[in-house]
Image (cartoon, helix red, strand yellow):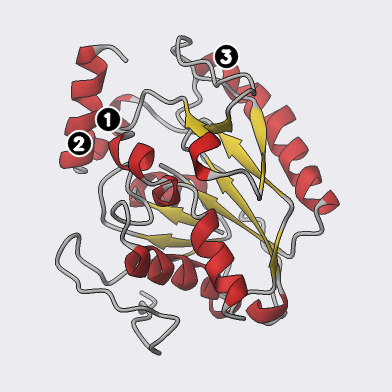
Amino acid sequence: MCLSVSREITEAVRPPRALFLRWPFGRTLGEPGAREQQLTVLLAALELATTATRPGTIVDAPWRWRRHAFVDPLANAGDAPHAS
Amino acid sequence: MGSLRKLVTKLYARFPSLTRWWLRRHPIETTRSVPFAPFTLPLARARLGLVTSGGVYVEGQLPFDTADPDGDPGWRPLPVDVPEERLAIAHETYDTTAALLDRNVVYPVARARELVAAGRLGALCDEHVGLMGHIDGRHLAALVERTAPAVAQHFVRQRADLVLLVPA
């Protein structure tokens, strides 16, 4: 499975499972030092292993760049993306 | 890094829609079938391998070749316990400003360690993998025919249950 910052490339390459983030290149997990943001993205990607049962699934992450207040996913439940 | 290339990478970072413009001029390799294996193991018992294509390597290893316009199709083993300050980056086709401040934005090994410590993830492989993205032209065959199978075998030897690719 993979993270993606380009839906066009991911649709062409067709990895087994992907989490697409409409974020800038070079900041795939988020901003430097943003632990809560990075943990949230990583957990969401890993959870695709069990939730994405259709080959080639691309899930659009719901978070807008610099418009979302991330909380610590190790302290709080929720904040998961929704499959499209 | 040349100043013009540095400016271009910053523009791509600032305006992701430029990717669509780039793709119209640089067709990428496509695949017909999707490799897929059902995954039934709980994450809390799974062993994770990480692949970053952000040009991450360990100081002392041969850096990725940034002078070749077709990129460097090789791979570098990234031992899980290497301190962040020894993780270097050789890549000129994305804006590395954020990754140089915090490797986790392209290689989230510290965050993965936290998931293991919290019991949300079973374990990490002993060695993860660094690649250089933006492989093109004459190096595409080496990437597909040599590097990809070698990396897959590496993670079989590492007893990985799942592998996450993080592009940059």
Mark 3 neighbour density, 10 Å: few (under 14) some (14–19) many (20 or more): few
Q: Are marks 2 and 1 in contact (CB under 8 Å)?
A: yes
* Residue at 70% across, 31% down: B147
- Residue B144 seen anywhere in this rendered image of the structure: yes
User: Which of the 4 image quarters holds residue A12?
Assistant: top left
Q: CA distance from mark 2 to mark 1?
A: 6 Å
Task: State the residue position of label 3.
Answer: B138
- Label 1–label 3 contact, CB within 8 A: no
Say which quarter of the image contains residue B129.
top right
Q: Chain of mark 1?
A: B
Task: Identify the residue at image location x=52%, y=15%.
Answer: B65
Quadrant housing the C terminus of chain B? top left
Check disc 2 and give the amino acid type. Leu
Q: At x 22% / y 39%, what residue is drawn?
A: B13
Q: Amino acid at mark 3?
A: Arg
**Mark 2 and mark 1 on one chain:** yes
* Above or below B26: residue B156: below
Q: Could you tell me which residue is drawn at 18 percent across and 23 percent down?
A: B7
The N terminus of chain B, quarter of image: top left
Viewer-closest of B158 and A60: B158
| Dot 2: element | helix
Residue indicated by mark 1: B22
Residue A49 shows in this picture:
no
Percent coordinates x, y for residue A68 in the rendering? 19, 71
Tag 1 and tag 3 share a subunit? yes
Mark 1 vs mark 3: which is more N-terminal? Answer: 1
